[in-house]
Amino acid sequence: MSIHYNNQRKIFTLTTRSTTYQMRISDLGHLIHLYYGRKIEGTMEYLCVPRDCGFSPNPYQLRVERSWSMDLLPQEYSGSNTGDFRLSSLNLITDNGIRGVDLYYVRHEIRTGKYAIPAMPAAFDRDGEAETLSVTLKDPVTGLEAELLYGVYEQQDVITRAVHLTNTGTCTIHLEKVASLCLDIPFGKWDMLHFVGRHTMERQMERIPLMNGIQTVASRRGTSSHQHNPFVILCDKSATEDSGDCYGIMLVYSGNHRTDVEVDQSGSVRVVSGIHDEQFSWKLESGESFDTPEVLLTFTHQGFTPLSQNYHRFLKKNICRSKYTYARRPVLINNWEATYFDFDSDKILQIARQAKELGVEMLVLDDGWFGKRNDDNSGLGDWFVNKSKLPDGLEPLIAQINDMGLKFGLWVEPEMVNEDSELYRTHPDWAMMVPGREPAISRNQLVLDLSREDVVDWLYETLSGLLHRYHIEYIKWDMNRSISDVYSRILPPDQQGEVAHRYVLGLYRLLDRLTTEFPDVLFEGCSGGGGRFDAAMLAYSPQIWCSDNTDAIERLSIQYGTSFGYPIASMGSHVSACPNHQTGRNVPLGTRAVVAMAGTFGYEMDLNKLKDEEKQQVRQQIKQFHEYYDLIQNGDYYRLDCGEENHYFTAWQFVAPDQSEALVSIVVTHPRLNLNSICLRLKGLDPEACYVVDRQEFFGCDVPRDRIPMGDSGKTKQSYSGTVLMYGGYVLPQMFGDYPSVQIYLKKEL
Ligand code: GLA
C-alpha cells in the first residue's frame, strides 16, 4: 500500500519509491501539510512548530492560545478571508454576499486505482500501480465541499493532485478562484526554474532565486502559451543536473493558467497552481460540482536529470493515450516551408516523389489546401478542398501519394475562422467577440466559440467527415492565435466568467471524440509552433510541433528547455532549408539532422532542391535515424551541457534503458580558439561494462584523423570502460567552422 492513514495521530502518509508525502488533520479539523521530500520513516508533526507571530491571527476556537495561526501553518489547501494572508487556493462569493472559505475535514477514502477527472485529461493507470486518496473538506458556512484527490504512482515517484468541489449548501456559489494544488514548503532556500519565451522562441529555461513576495508563471491567452509553460521546478540553491532537492510542478491544462510561488514573512514557500483566476468565475448552484485540472508532482534529491526522466516516463506511460506513443512513427516531410500557400498537386507530388526516393515515409500537406485559402487572410473554417489548387480533389492526390508507398497527413486549424469564409458568412455568431466592440484580430482570424456545444458538434461532424472520406493517417492540429474578446452569446451574464474554461473543455471533448473514433490516426499538436505544448495536449497527440523556428541552432535551446518536462518523443522537430527561413542562418545539413534527431525527426523543405551529395546525406540520415529510433524515442535522456550557459557547445545523450547502447550528440555553437578541449563526462552507462565506439561522425568540419583523441584509431574500433567515459570523460578534437557537430554511437561490449 502506498497510502497509509494513522488513525491515532490522524496522519496520512503517501509513499513512492523514493519520496514521502505527509499531512495531518489538526485538532480543529484543518488539513495541515507536514512533509514532501526524500523518503523517510516516521512522522513529521515536529516540523509544524507552534509559534506566536504578531499580526497573524488565531482561530476563534483557541481564544488566548496564540501560537496556532492559519497564517503560519503549512496547509494542504488554503482557504481565504480567514486569517491566512498568504496565497489562497480557493475564493468565492455566495449569492448573499459571503466571501471566502474555511475548510474542515469531513471524511476520507483510500482506494486502489486512479481517480478520473470528468471532461479533462488526467493521468490514467496503465498497469494497475496507482492508488487514490480522497480527503473531503467542507466549509460549514457556505456548504462548499472540497474533495482533495491524490493519485500515488509508487514506482514512478509521481503524485497527482486535483480537487472536486460540490456545493452542498442552499445558496448559489460563484467560484472566483479554484486552484488545483497548494503546496507549502516551510523550510529551505529555493531557486525556481521556469520556461519562458515567445512565438519562435519557446520554453527558454530561466533559473531565478525566489524572492520575498510572489512570483508568477501564468498565461491569460486562452492557451498554455509560448510565453509561460505551465510547469515549474523548485530546487535548492546548489541543485545541478545530478544533485540537489528538486520539486516538479506540472499542470495538465491547456488554457489560462497560473502558478504563484510566494515566499512569506517567515521565509516559508507556498506554491498555488491552477486555472488563472483573472476573468474567471464559475456559478455553482446547490448540488452542482466543479473539477479542477490535475497537477503532476515529482520530487528527487538527485537533481534535474532524474526529475526530467520521471516526467518523460510518466507522460508517455500515464498521460499519452495514443497507440503511437511507443510505436514507430513515420519520418515525414511537410510542405509548409517548401511551398507555403503556393502549390498545386503536381508540386506536392514532385516533393513527395523525391522524399520517397530518399526514404521519407509520410507526406504532410500543410496549410492552404482548403476553402479560398491562398494566403492567411481567408478560408479558415471552410474544410473542403480548394479547387483552384487541387481541381481533382484530395482523393487522387492521396491515392498517388499512397501508391508511391507514402502515408498521407493533413493540416487543419479547426478552432479558427476567417471573416472571409463561408463558415463565417453562415454563422457569424460562432466567432467570439464582445457585443458592441470590434474584436482584436490576429493573423486576420477570429476564434470559434468552443464553449458552445453546437460549434463543437459541427467541428466534430466536419473533421470526422474528412477522416472518414479520405485516407488520412496523420493530422497536424494547429491553433494560430491567442484568444481575446472572450464572450459567448449563449451564456447568461453571470456565467460569462466560465467561457475561457468552457472553451478548453469543448476542445478536450472534440479531441476526445476524434481520437477515440480514429485511434489509427496519428495526431500532432501545434499552435504557431509550440504555443500549446502541455501535458493535457499530450493526452491526445503524442507529439507537438515544438516551434515555428526551424533554425537548428535556435532549436538547441528550445529543445533543451522543453526537455526539462517533456519527452523527446513528443517534440516535433524537422530539418529545414538553408538559409533558414526564420533567421537567415546557414547550418550544415548534418548538424541540422543531429538536432532534429533530438525529436520526432522529419523534413520541412523541398528535397528536389538539394545537390546530389546532399540527397545522399539525407538518405543516410533517415537510415541512421531508423537505427537509433528506439534509443532516441524510448531511451533515457541526459542533458550534458548547454551552449546558452557555456557559450561554446550543446551536448546531450541517450542511453538505452538496459544500458546496452548510447548516443551522444554535440553541436558547437561558438567555435573557440586556444581553449581546452571539450571533455564530456558521459552519464547513465554501466560502470562495470566496456563500451566500443561503434560510430563517430563529424559534420560541418574537417578534423584530421590524427587529431581525434578518442574513438577513432583508424584501424580498430576503440573501446573504453563505463567508468572511464563517465568519470574521466570523452575528449573531442577542436572543431571549427559554422556549427559543426558530432554524433557518437557507443555499444556495450558483451
Ligand atoms: C503555424 C504552424 C506552421 C504552419 C503554419 C501554417 O504557424 O506552426 O508549422 O503549419 O501555421 O499556416
Image (tube, grey):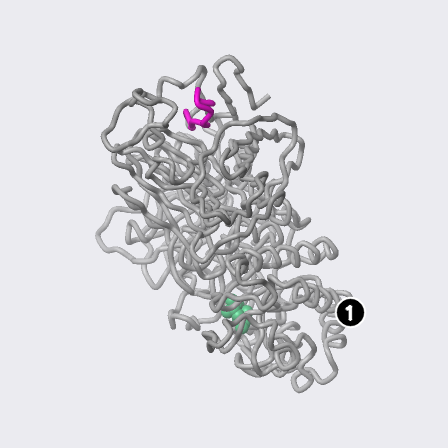
Q: Answer left or right for 360 relative to 392.
A: left
Q: Using the rendered image of the protein, determine whether residue 527 is visible from the camera's viewpoint.
A: yes
Neighbours of disc 1 within 10 Å: few (<14), some (14-19), many (20+): few
Q: How many marks?
A: 1
Between 383 and 144, the residue placed more toward the observer is 144
Pick whichever, 385 or 13, lies toward us: 13
Rendered-image quadrant of the C terminus: top right
Up/down of 667 relative to 127, above or below: below
Q: Is residue 30 magenta?
A: yes
Q: Residue 506, relative to residue 121: is it above or below?
A: below
354 in relation to 90, above or below: below
Residue type of the residue flagged with mark 1: Arg
| Residue 671 placement, left or right of 471 | left
Q: Is 524 above or below relative to 298?
A: below
Q: What residue did someone put label 1 on?
A: 469
In the image, what residue occupies the spot 46% across and 46% down? 92
Q: Which residues are magenta?
A: 24-36
Residue in view at x 56 percent, y 41 percent: 165
